[in-house]
Image (cartoon, rainbow, N blue to C red):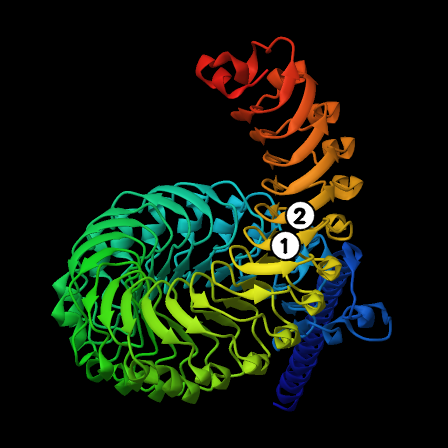
Amino acid sequence: MTITVALASLVLVRRKEGFFHALFFLIILLYVISATWCTATAAAGIKEAASDRAALLSFKSLVDDDPFGALSSWNNGSLHYCRWRGVSCGRRHPNRVTALDLKSLRLAGLISPSVANLTFIQRIDLSDNKLDGSIPEELGSLRQLRFLNLSVNSLRGTIPSSLGNCSNLQLLNLRDNKLNGEISPTLSRLSGLRELILNQNMLQGTIPDSIGNLSSLLSLSLGNNSLSGAMPPSFGGLLSLKMLEIQSTSLTGTIPPTLANLSSLNVLALGGNNLHGEIPHFAQLPFLSYLACSYNHLSGTIPISLGRLSSLEHLDLGVNNLIGEIPSSLYNLSSLNTLALSYNQLKGTLPSDIGNAFPNLQVLLMEGNQLGAQIPASLSNASELYELELSFNAFHGTIPQSLGALQSLFRLTLAVNRLEARNPSDWSFFTALTNCTSLQVLDLGYNLLQGMMPKSIVNLSTSLNFLSLSNNQISGIIPTEIEKLINLTVLDMSVNDLRGTIPVEISHLWQLQYLDLSNNMLSGKIPPTLGKLTRMDQLYLGSNEFEGAIPPTLSNMLMLESLNLSNNRLSGSIPQEVLTLSSLTNFLDLSHNLLNGSLPLEVGNLIIIGALDLSNNRLSGETPDTIGKCTVLEILHLENNLFQGSIPSSISNLRGLQELDLSKNFYSGPIPAFLDELPDLQYLNLSFNSFEGRVPMKGVFKNASELEQFCV
């Protein structure tokens, strides 16, 4: 019994020892396996981390210019790359790059294909830089990418079709680049895409119908490209879409009625295309707040159903072929802040209570129609109105004094109507407008305004930069206090009955770029101080009663492109200084004056002038050969002067010459043969001179009826 127990105890001890040995072996084995796995994982992590770092350095190597030193931290070997500027890494994988955000840093150079090695990246924002080159095809391998913004750069080439493989992409913004080619249908694979923004490029071809399969799309912007063809009806299937913008392309056809199915739509912008047909009924779009279809060829009437778009705030149907009257239902849209129906063929009137119907109105654009009756005084109730354009219509009666209550008004254009001011009380609106302290543009030209120039003109807003009273019947003088309007860039008082002199104080309007006082009865001398207006590019003083010499100080207007002093009583010689204005690109018209002396050699400085008219003066001597340097010249009139000698041979250099009139002078010698070789010459008058010899038979001389103009 004792032996048996002992043997049993020995067996039990040995079993326990075997168990512990096995357990110990198992622990050692698990440790080895764990260590091996950790070592392999660590090695893989180190390798992947090294790959991310190398990809970032490759990106930096192709950046040619970094004016703000944004990537300077990327040179710091002791700083972990996850702390480099613009670089973010993940929480679960702290050594893997998940975002690259380097927007608005003026970086120039190329986008490295090595960015595709950042396999954990979810966000790339390189917008608003100066990057060029192409978008790397390799980006299509980034399966975790959700956000790609390369907008506002100079990227070229096509949109890589491989981007259709970025299955998690939610935003793709490539706007404002130089991309070309067609939009790849592969983008339709991006089933989770919410925003697709490709506007302001040079993309061509038709819009892929397959884009209508992007069921998650909330925003689609394809405007400012060269896209053509019809708009895909499949867009009507984008039921989640909130913004659709395809402006300034070359889309043709009609607006698909299926767009009325987009019940979530907030913004629909289709302006600047070649769309035709009628405007569909969009009454089933309860959330539509922005509708713009301007600059198309849409026809028919404005749908009455638009008046049921209770959320509409912006309606722009301008520059189309719409006819009929403005439907009264539109005046139910009290939420409207912009109503633009310019340049159509709309008739009728504006309702007298329009200001009450649109209490939130800020912009009302109705110019270029056939609207009549009086301008409603109730517009003053739209207290937020800041832009009111009613030009090119048939409005009549007086201008409402109540417009002066529009404190925010900055643009008021009422030109080309039949608006009247027959007595001083009719001008009360002008005094009222002095309350509009933000007014910048005031255009009352081409109306029936009569009587004296209101003294209150000098009390208009000092913010005013455009003032036109042209083509009316306004009399009186230009007040010296006009100098108060210190920000004027355009002043047009042409075609009126103004008298007196040009006040010297106009020279204090130092920002003036356009001055037109032509076709009045202004007299006296042209103030030499006008030369202080060095920003002037258009100066028109023709058809007045100015006398005396042309001020040489006008040569200080180094930006002057057009100068018209014709039909006055100016005397003396043509100042050499004025002929040094190489900026004169449009025309110089000194015709119908009393100018004498010779034509200065400096006329050759007008090397890019388009038209030169010195006719009907008392200029004498020979025409200088330097006139042949005016190689862009298209119109040359020297008729009715005292020029003599032969026609300068240098005129043969004026290959673009279309009109040449040398009649009623004392030119002599043969008619130059080169005149029949000027390819664009359409009008030639050499009559009443002393030419001799044979008349050329080619070119402009071929027309026998024109030969009667030549006196040989």
Q: Residue at x 48, y 55 (%)?
A: 198
Give the amino acid type for the residue marked by disc 2 in the picture.
Answer: Leu
Left or right: where 3 falls relative to 311: right
Q: Nearer the viewer, residue 687 or 629?
A: 687
Give the amino acid type for the residue marked by disc 1 in the picture.
Answer: Leu
Q: Is residue 128 visible?
A: yes
Which numbered disc covers residue 595?
A: 2
Tally the numbered discs.
2
Left or right: where 551 falls relative to 178: right
- Circles 2 and 1, Cβ within 8 Å, touching? The answer is yes
Q: Is residue 154 above or below residue 217?
A: above
Quarter of the image for residue 329 reads bottom left
What whole-number distance in Å separates the C-alpha atoms at marks 2 and 1? 6 Å
Q: Nearer the viewer, residue 237 or 466?
A: 466
Q: Residue at x 76, y 33 (%)?
A: 624
Which numbered disc covers residue 561?
A: none
Q: Position of residue 658 (x, y in %)?
A: 56, 29
10 Å neighbourhood of mark 1: few (<14), some, or many (≥20)?
A: many
Q: Position of residue 338 (x, y in %)?
A: 32, 72
Please name the residue that numbered disc 1 is placed on.
Answer: 570
Residue at the extreme bottom: 2
Quarter of the image for residue 55 reads bottom right
Q: Residue at x 23, y 82 (%)?
A: 377
Q: Secondary structure at mark 2?
A: strand
Q: Is residue 389 visible?
A: no
Can you say which quadrant of the picture contains the C terminus?
Answer: top right
> N-terminal of the two: label 2 or label 1?
1
Q: Is residue 443 above or below residue 400?
A: above
Q: Is residue 504 above or below residue 280?
A: below
Q: Is residue 182 above or below residue 264?
A: above
